[in-house]
Amino acid sequence: MDQIIVTGNGPLSGQIPIAGAKNACLTLMPATLLSEEPLTLTNAPRLSDIRTMTLLLQSLGAEVQALQDGQVLAMSSHDLTSTRAEYDIVRKMRASILVLGPLLARFGHAEVSLPGGCAIGARPVDLHLKAFEAMGAELDLRDGYVHAKAPAGGLKGGIVDFPFVSVGATENALMAATLAKGTTVLKNAAREPEIVDLAHCLRKMGAQIDGEGTSEITVQGVDRLGGATHRVVTDRIELGTYMLAPAICGGEVECLGGKIELLAAFCEKLDAAGISVEETPTGLKVARKSGRVSAVDVTTEPFPGFPTDLQAQMMALLCTAEGTSVLEEKIFENRFMHAPELIRMGAKIDVHGGTATVKGVDRLRGAPVMATDLRASVSLILAGLAAEGETIVSRVYHLDRGYEHVVRKLESVGAKIERVKEQ
């Protein structure tokens, strides 16, 4: 098993290219199941989750080829052999549930195992299933699988009113609705850039969609979808993560491909903390204005609010802020598991339920720490950049699910970081 060793060594300088969005790509890939014609994705990130989704699609009979060093995915579902997504693959990743909507819409039936993934709360699939029921589907949960069947003639348009915002359920319902008979209205829909990106791709395939990026999306079902070539949107979570690197240890870094509109609420918090964010023709230039950063309060919310996937990384920054910060997690339960590891590095953090109070310290100290999930793992690396001495991060396999070439990218701007085999 690998470890990452980080030694704090001062300010960073240079450019970091930001990859295509993992969460967008994992949603776009199942869209191939909606059509017999080829779907090609460019700017694809090279991550273990993408490989897992590739294996899942291939297990259904889809053709998936990774071209140009994995940055282009050429897919075709013209000759599927199965509509059953098996537990052995689905258990590895929660995004696997996104094959259910496309399979159900195109073939009228599907069996999909209940998914797995990071240990950050239950994240039930109830909202996905209620959306399909609103389109006339019959659902049966047994033996750990969702057995779904569309009515005779296929799914029907309907009103889907989500009781709370869910990105995954919005994506699954949106894909299913493209082939449903009649009009489907998704109310209280998620507004994330990944939803907008999916809608743009589906529209290229021939779908009739209005309202993406708002809380109400209207879909007029069509008889069939065609092929398309689509560029995956920039990964706003990787973007935010690397923006925090110069924020936490000083210097100036340009994140290539970044746009403020992807992370407006996050950029507002950085500004309040004393971090300069400037748009350039090629990305976002980030620098700490002067001295220690200032404490700020953060509450995670659905887009366009502060992203839950940047909460752990922001906590790492606030551990060295001047003053006391309060972070409130409103999206997922159990998402402060990185706090005890940061405390091992000298941070002062008090967690009560969904709230963490962080009292800034002058300096963190390097220590052996253990990653508990994807975003927690990179928060510990960021903390290590600002710490005195050496930080050894174990269980970094989590990292490979969401960040490509993290060591290479941080090394390129002057970080002292290496990946080694665990002794």
Image (cartoon, grey):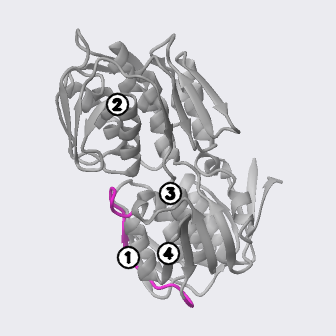
Disc 1 to disc 3, C-alpha distance: 19 Å
Measure how far apart labels 4 and 2 are at the Cα level. Answer: 36 Å
Counting residues from the start of the chain, the first of labels 1 and 4 encountered is: 4
Q: Which of the marked residues, 3 or 2, is nearer the chain's N terminus?
A: 2
Q: Are marks 1 and 4 in contact (CB under 8 Å)?
A: no
Horizontal placement of 223 versus 343: left or right?
left
Looking at the picture, does residue 78 appear above or below residue 413?
above
Q: Of helix, strand and loop, which mostly describes the magenta segment?
A: loop
The disc label shown at residue 313, or none: none
What's drawn in magenta, residue-wise?
290-306
Residue under numbered circle 3: 237
Kindly identify the amino acid type of the residue bearing the numbered disc 1.
Asp
Is 140 rendered above or below residue 190? above
Q: Is residue 284 visible?
A: yes
Residue that numbered label 4 is attached to: 278
Q: Which residue lies furthest to the left in this view?
A: 159
Nearest to N terminus: mark 4 or mark 2: 2
Identity, as a three-letter code, of the amino acid under mark 2: Met
Q: Name the residue under label 2.
A: 175
Residue 257, given in percent of the width and then of the height, sits at: 55, 59
Query: Spatial distance from mark 3 to mark 2, Cα to Cα?
Result: 23 Å
Q: Which residue in the structure is indicated by mark 1? A: 297
Residue at the spot 59% in from the left edge and 51% down from the top edge: 19
Q: SS for tag 2? A: helix
